[in-house]
Image (cartoon, helix red, strand yellow):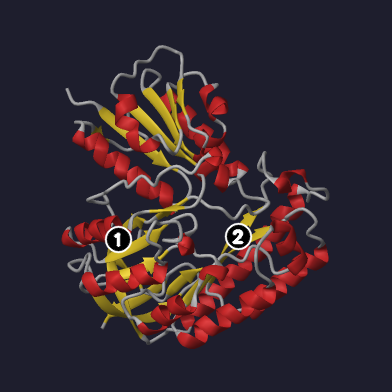
Amino acid sequence: MNKTAAIYTLGCKLNQYETMFLLEQLEKCGYTIVPFESMADVYIINSCTVTNKGDYHSRMKIRQALHTNPDALIVATGCSAQVNPRRLAAIPGVDLILGNAEKGDMMHYLAPLKKNGSPHIRVSRLDQQTPLFHSLFINHFSSYTRAFLKIQEGCNQRCSYCIVPTARGKNRSARYEDVLSQARQLVENGYQELVLTGIHLGTYGQDLERKTSLSDLLEAMINCLGSVRLRLSSIEPTEITPALKRLVAQSPRICAHLHIPLQSGDDQILQAMHRPYTCAFYKELIEELVSLRPDISIGADVMAGFPGETHESFQRTFQFIESLPLAYLHVFSFSPRPGTQAAQLPHQIDGRIKKERCTLLRKLGRDKFYHFRRHFLTHPLPALVLGQKDEATTHHIALTGNYIKVVTPGANDLVNQQINVEITDVLEGRTIGKIR
């Protein structure tokens, strides 16, 4: 009888990409993939450690798997496993802990694994070396009409609050030829949108023997991939070069959508975070991008409650974001990560205050996204029909290039096709449209 496996993924698009690779490998080895809530022979938790909440949910999912089937093999991998493997190994019933460097070889470790009450830990110290980039080639993204494409890994920036350099290692890029080969394969398999992902996407190519850049890669992809559209995941403000601005402004094949982390709208806090820009720099960048491409959707990460964030500095952040032509916000509260400089800083902020500030910022983000969507009422927008359906209406959702999910009646036979959609109504939690 075939063995069954279930995977639960926490955290970023990079983890989602790597989960897809693992799913393909499991299926090649004869496993049947089942929902995480089902009985399975193997449970894999691809964990996150960016916040305390990520660590907590990673442990919770391990315990959930053990509750569902105490006899199953339990594998923990990802960033929480990388940073604190012994904490996860201490949970009774865990059988294998794999670091991020070992994740791609999971089948090698899983094949001989037996449940014997003694967890195996295979975790390399990524912060003490410059490991090679592991090209994890993927052919299909189950249940997705868009494909992620991992082109970069690791980070050299060392922001004072961030554990990612420890969890993911130093900056390294996929070989230029490998990226184009993987992209061609995904396009041949029918994907109409590729989302380029990485930890520090804008540094792509700087570490390669033959140096290149993200803008060079995008130009090559535009020239060789037909009509497929390209979307960038998060990119740092200091890495948006003149060449990249030109491409975003001029190429309809690049989605009018950028996610550009801000973190704080107060220069003193940015300096304490070791963020390499000022509020004035960020504001000028955002306003320039909007002037170059008026339909662009720009999102930002913002952190509430960094040590030393006074009421006044929070108000400066709030008012700064209010003044910017941002489309949406991803709001986080500061979470002290052991091993980071910010965890040791004085003037830590009370949890209640952090929660209040997050609530205010999230409302601001919702208001901004509502007004951003209303700006495009009756405007035709290019969109890709997703496999995802709106729960209330069962109509398919079309994702516009500028990152608006539009409930689109009549699109049921158009899944994975690029269409034009007109927004006809904007509600607080839903955008309605029609095919043009």
Q: Mark 1 packing: few (<14 Cα in 10 Å), some, or many (20+)?
A: many
Determine if residue 236 is in view.
Answer: yes
Residue 353: % across, % down: 76, 54
Q: Which residue is mark 2?
A: 331
**Contact between labelled residues 1 and 2, with CB atoms less than 8 Å apart:** no
Say which quadrant the C terminus sits in.
Answer: bottom left
Count the marks.
2
Q: Which residue is mark 1?
A: 146
Residue at horizontal 47%, vertical 67%? 429
Left or right? Give the position of 217 relative to 298: left
Determine if residue 392 is in view.
Answer: no
Residue with the most extreme front position: 209
Vertical side of 84 occupied by 428: above or below? below
| Element carrying mark 2 | strand
16 and 212: which is toward the camera: 212
Vertical side of 276 occupied by 427: above or below? below
Residue 220: % across, % down: 29, 71
Between discs 2 and 1, the one toward the N terminus? 1
427 and 212: which is toward the camera: 212
Q: Mark 2 packing: few (<14 Cα in 10 Å), some, or many (20+)?
A: some
Q: Amino acid at mark 2?
A: Val
| Element carrying mark 1 | loop
Residue with the most extreme top position: 116
Q: Quadrant of residue 313?
A: bottom right
Residue at horizontal 27%, vertical 68%? 385
Residue 331: % across, % down: 60, 60
Residue at horizontal 34%, vertical 57%? 148
Q: Gap in Å between the C-alphas at discs 2 and 1?
A: 25 Å
